[in-house]
Amino acid sequence: MAMAELSTPKTTSPFLNSSSRLRLSSKLHLSNHFRHLLLPPLHTTTPNSKISCSVSQNQAPVAVQENGLVKTKKECYGVFCLTYDLKAEEETRSWKKLINIAVSGAAGMISNHLLFKLASGEVFGPDQPIALKLLGSERSIQALEGVAMELEDSLFPLLREVDIGTDPNEVFQDVEWAILIGAKPRGPGMERADLLDINGQIFAEQGKALNKAASPNVKVLVVGNPCNTNALICLKNAPNIPAKNFHALTRLDENRAKCQLALKAGVFYDKVSNMTIWGNHSTTQVPDFLNARINGLPVKEVITDHKWLEEGFTESVQKRGGLLIQKWGRSSAASTAVSIVDAIKSLVTPTPEGDWFSTGVYTDGNPYGIEEGLVFSMPCRSKGDGDYELVKDVEIDDYLRQRIAKSEAELLAEKRCVAHLTGEGIAYCDLGPVDTMLPGEV
Ligand code: LMR
């Protein structure tokens, strides 16, 4: 969804000045990649070894070495190195096992809203301790420190670790969830093909890193645009992780659609259910008013202005991101973070009876005749175990079919354009006479 996450605040390179070194060495534990940039080596050891803090109560973190090798332990930020043993305290004894959550673009605006929601327990529940693994760009390392400091100062009981780094191979170690937000925004005069290529390379690299380092059943939510095709690239580069575990965020579009329908019907938005977004997170997306319901009734019975549904409503959802940029001067951030929370909660809590949610998923054996091998937004349900099933009996009329086909054609064109990144041969970029748009590009 919203981008610009890689272009976090510019810093003049602070890494070589000695006062930074001092501060960092006493407080901050960075991934090895950065340690090499910042600090003189602590000792000599085999290449690729990691230097980590050891964790014990009331003791400053130290590098530890075992059997002549540096022991690989989690790196941690400041206060998160100190209290670790959840079983030692009455209050935390009944908590679940700690889960590792990676967030890329962690110094960006969306993350700045999201991380505090994750840490508060709002997403995974009040008995689920978490470790946050924050991935940023080299330019954003200072800002990442700032994020980590604010997380420290927030005293979230459930937040047990914060690690920051710039190497996905290290940051993604053992993660059970990866929320991939960081992506390059489309610059002036940049072709969409260039955007696909630049971001595709980021997501190919991250897919490889997830494949190598993450938990084998990691769930991956791709937010950075163009999120459907980025998710496809990511999953193709992670053959050991089930393709079903990858999602592209279209929940923001679902939320926007519910809001527009509620406004028109004069009801509060909690009365709108069964909202599907079909297709791509772009201006070809199809918000499905045929199957959505208001107060349990078909939308078309409640809103009789069908012309508005086909034109005004559809376009308002497709272009909402762009309108927001006009108002704000930047992409949506807070509502995107909220929709990430919604998307994850939809996977970790059972879907209410009769309802569903939208998420971009791999079209492997879908019942709607959508071309296989795309990441396409569809209606899904979950038992709350992190997994989902497609809803299989949603009605598609001619209007929907035509619109869905357009979004499908767009995604197929994007896929051909990134074939060099998905291992499917030579890329061929023909994105059509009208350049396709992200919602924020209108
Ligand atoms: C949004 O839908 O708000 C964003 O994806 C817009 C954008 O292009 O950054």
Image (cartoon, helix red, strand yellow):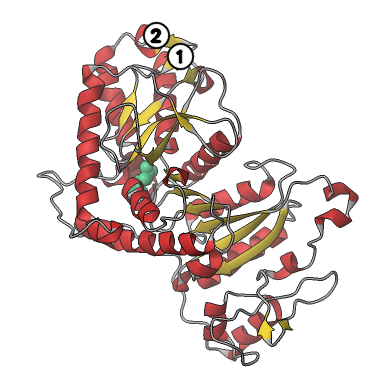
Q: Report ligand 1 position as a quadrant.
A: top left
Residue 18 seen in the figure: yes
Foreground: 331 or 47? 47
Point out residue 296 in the picture as x, y percentages from the top left corner.
Answer: 48, 11
Q: Which residue is mark 2?
A: 302
- The answer to which of marks 2 and 1 sits earlier in the sequence is 1
Point out residue 131 in the picture as x, y percentages from the top left corner.
Answer: 66, 57
Q: Which residue is mark 1?
A: 294
Q: Is residue 59 above or below residue 318?
A: below
Location of residue 341 (image quadrant): top right
Q: Is residue 256 above or below residue 196?
A: above
Q: Is residue 28 above or below residue 18?
A: above
Point out residue 374 in the picture as x, y percentages from the top left corner.
Answer: 30, 42
Q: Amino acid at mark 2?
A: Val
Residue 6 seen in the figure: no
Q: Amino acid at mark 1?
A: Ile
> Do residues under tags 2 and 1 come within 8 Å of each other at their CB atoms?
yes
